Image: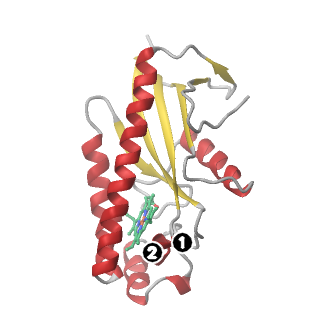
Amino acid sequence: MPKFMTKSLLILISSASSTWVFADSPKEQIHYLEQSRATAHEFMQSLGRKLKSLLETADTENAIIVCKQIAPAMAADYSKDGWIVKRVSLKSRNKSMGVPDTWERRELEGFDRHHLSGEPTDELEMSAIVDEADGLWFRYLKAIPTQPMCLQCHGKAEDMPDGVKAILAHEYPNDDAINYSVGEIRGAISIKRQISAHE
Ligand code: HEC
């Protein structure tokens, strides 16, 4: 059974036992998927543009604001009208925001396997209807691949300016978000909304 979607409109139901069942894709859920794709695309494009222009015009230290303030603020802006939007990672820097839940973790591990098998990661995404403790949720996860410009703050020690290393060491003593290479999955944009509550 295909677990990864690229362009297709495929909705899966994930039960607590982790078995995957194809479900009818009601119009509403297809709409959720399309909206999630649009949000993830806009989020990534906009952050990428801001980061690129700051890295071109200022010291790397000054670009920290994009990942630290602008990205969470944008996620908060998108989190309205029933939507919840955030960034998660298997190796997070900010432990209070970036740690994945069970479903996100499993799918992120799947994304990594996909990357290790040599497949491109740009279009990698996953969507499912997940049965959670409090009800059924529409879930969507879009991989964020590591680009060359990310290495200045998420790469190996030799990729990172000393000033950045000093700030990160001070602000994130438990930082796991380093040692990435280009093409690896840095994390994902996670989007969810509740479909129904359990009785
Ligand atoms: C100038 C430094 C800098 C650059 C360049 C940078 N980041 Fe970050 N990134 C950070 C910091 C600092 C955080 C922690 C933000 C916070 O406190 O929430 C972070 C957090 C993240 C997170 C949230 C998950 C986590 O680890 O906490 C993701 C995803 C992420 N970055 C992806 C990227 C990607 C993709 C790029 C390249 C397109 C990139 N970053 C470039 C500094 C940077």
Side of 76 where 21 appears, left or right: right
Residue 76 placement, left or right of 35 = left
Left or right of 164 in this view: 129? right
Element type at marker 1?
A: loop
Q: Residue at x 40, y 24 (%)?
A: 31
Q: Residue at x 37, y 61 (%)?
A: 48
Q: Give the mark nearer the N terminus: 1 vs 2.
A: 2
Q: Secondary structure at mark 2?
A: helix
Q: Is residue 91 above or below residue 158?
A: above
Q: Which residue is mark 1?
A: 178
Q: Nearer the viewer, residue 10 or 68?
A: 10
Quadrant containing the N terminus in the rendered view: top right
Task: Name the spot of residue 197 as percent of width and height, x first.
Answer: 41, 17
Give 135 or 46, whichever is nearer the viewer: 46
Residue 168: x, y in percent?
41, 76
Q: What residue appears at the point 58 percent right and 68 percent down from the top-left corner?
A: 182
The answer as to whether callout 2 falls within 8 Å of ligand 1 is yes
Amino acid type of disc 1? Ile
Checking the image for residue 153, the label placed there is: 2
- Which image quadrant for residue 185? bottom right
User: Looking at the figure, which quarter contains the C terminus?
Assistant: top left
